[in-house]
Amino acid sequence: MEQNELLLLEIKDLSVSYGSIVALREVSLSVKKGEVVALVGANGAGKSTMLKTVLGLQRATSGSIFFMGQEITRVAVDRIVSSGIVLIPEGRGIVMEMSVIENLELGSYHRREGVQRRLEEVFHQFPILGERREQRAGSLSGGEQQMLAIGRALMGDPNLIMMDEPSLGLAPIIINHLYEIITKLKDEQHNNILLAEQNATKALRIADRGYVFEKGRIVIQGTNQELIENDMVRQAYLGG
Amino acid sequence: MEALLAIIEAGIVSGSIYSLIAVGMTLLLVVADVIQFAYGQAVVISIFFCWLTLHLTNSVVLSFFVAAVVSTVLQFVLEPLLRTLRERKLVLETLILTIAVGMILTEAMCQYFNAGMPIAFPDSMAGGGWALSFRLIRITAADLYVVVATVASLAVLAFFLFKTRQGKTLRAMAYNIQVSRLLGIPIRKCTTLSFVVAGFLSALTAILLILALGAASPVLGENLTFKGLAVMMLGGMGNLKGAVLGGFILGLIEALVRGYLIGDWADAVGMGVIMFVITLKPAGLLGQVKQG
């Protein structure tokens, strides 16, 4: 079916349990090429678990995950990353003790051609990273670390960028700047982005489609417009 | 004055050996999360194999080659042995396993080589061949080889860790294994690499020991492992620069004690000083307490 060729990521009836705790219950979702998809919901609703399971950090109990037509359900993390999926984890996941440029280089572990060119592109997009390239990553502010995390993700020349709670712990002004960057990634660079966010307002504004998670299940899905106009979503997640 | 210079010279030579051992053990600790209690024994048993080869073949070159190969292979072969325990984060069990391997190696040296008696190497291997004497100061060729080889190998290691992609990957794993996994770094392959690097350091240490000491005994292995650990604690557990610094400090302390105190106080004073430093600064000289 032609429809399948446009599906970058397809998840079918995915269930994930941590011992006796069920984190995801038969979740199905998809990301089409060129889309930004938002996963919204409260803390602990299963969004993080979803992203980690796609990357292979968490083992699926049942169900399947397809990326660019290939099944990746129980494939090892390094193979999944080398096939073009990156995750910017909650808390950014920066190696504090290494320099900015060393952190960026780590992002290109699976994409060794064109490293210098991509570094220049990242420094062009985030000048502050270029200025601080030899500095210890731990000395950067929260917002700068978030840019470093995004820059590192871009160094891998990814087909899909997954972000887990990018606005967590950042001041409102920084969050605005962050979302400007994400918008640019979407509009100018046509990156495919799968975004898990508690800040539903921000996420739904830039996304094409969204899924609302509650207690490990998807309760509502639709285009961003549909979700923004949905009464239940408005009351629970958008402040009425 | 010359006595002091001679002592410092001796201290630098033994310090070099201690540094190499501590660096090898530190590498395994930070990348593979393993305290290799059998490290020194692996080095020394390869010296015994070298001696055996010499007696069987009379070839100096072949004997050195055997020492290098046995040492590297022993360190490297321990990786799959430890892997299951490590991956399940069974720290205590891993520790016990390496202690057990160490004991087995020591026992093997006692049982199967020279009936447990110390071994000695001919002058063609020990001492390196020539020596310079100036009154009380005596520098043998071996002394020179040890110091030059140590400095050179540490420089190569530093280059590897700070300027190459693989080396930077190992450092990333040492700092933050979670993030490394997330970046798609093949953890297993890289851990194996760290064992191989430790193996090369081991091989070098074995050869330098043959040159510097010209002799070995079964207990030397445990002794070296123990001192390696003490040096790591002195410099800061997991700190490579600390391991180098600590190694030279211990070497110098032991040499000073041997030179100025009558009786066999070198080991005791060395350990005593380390205990003293740890009491004042538990994290070690260059160590930092990890936050969070």
Image (spheres, coloured by chain):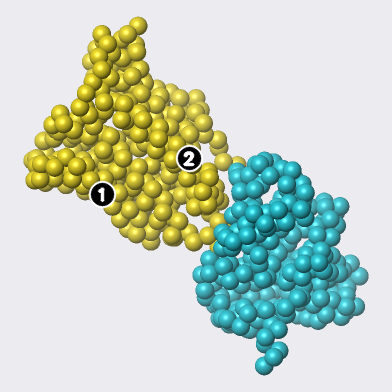
Q: Residue extending furthest top?
A: B1
Which chain has been coloured cyan in this picture?
Answer: A
Vertical placement of A164 versus B109: above or below? below
Q: Work out which quarter of the rendered image holds the N terminus of chain A and state it.
A: bottom right
Say whether residue B204 is left or right of residue B184.
Answer: left
> At 18% from the left edge and 33% from the top edge, which residue is drawn?
B125
Q: Position of residue B278 (x, y in %)?
A: 46, 28
On screen, residue A119 versus residue B263, left or right, reads right
Q: Return the x and y of residue B119 as percentages of the image width and height.
A: 13, 35
* Amino acid type at mark 1: Val
On residue B145, the disc is none
Tell me the residue at 39%/26% (across/down).
Answer: B248
Q: Of marks 1 and 2, which one's residue comes earlier in the chain?
A: 1
x, y (%) of residue B51?
15, 40
Up/down of A23 relative to B159, above or below: below
Say which residue label 1 marks: B69
Q: Is residue B40 visible?
A: no
Measured Cα–Cα span from mark 1 to mark 2: 23 Å
In this picture, is B217 found above or below B105? above
Look at mark 2 in the image and give the residue it sits on.
Answer: B158
Q: Is residue B132 above or below residue A11?
A: above
The colour assigned to chain B within the rendered structure:
yellow
Q: Is residue B255 visible?
A: yes
Q: Between residues A32 and B93, which one lies in front from this camera angle?
A: A32
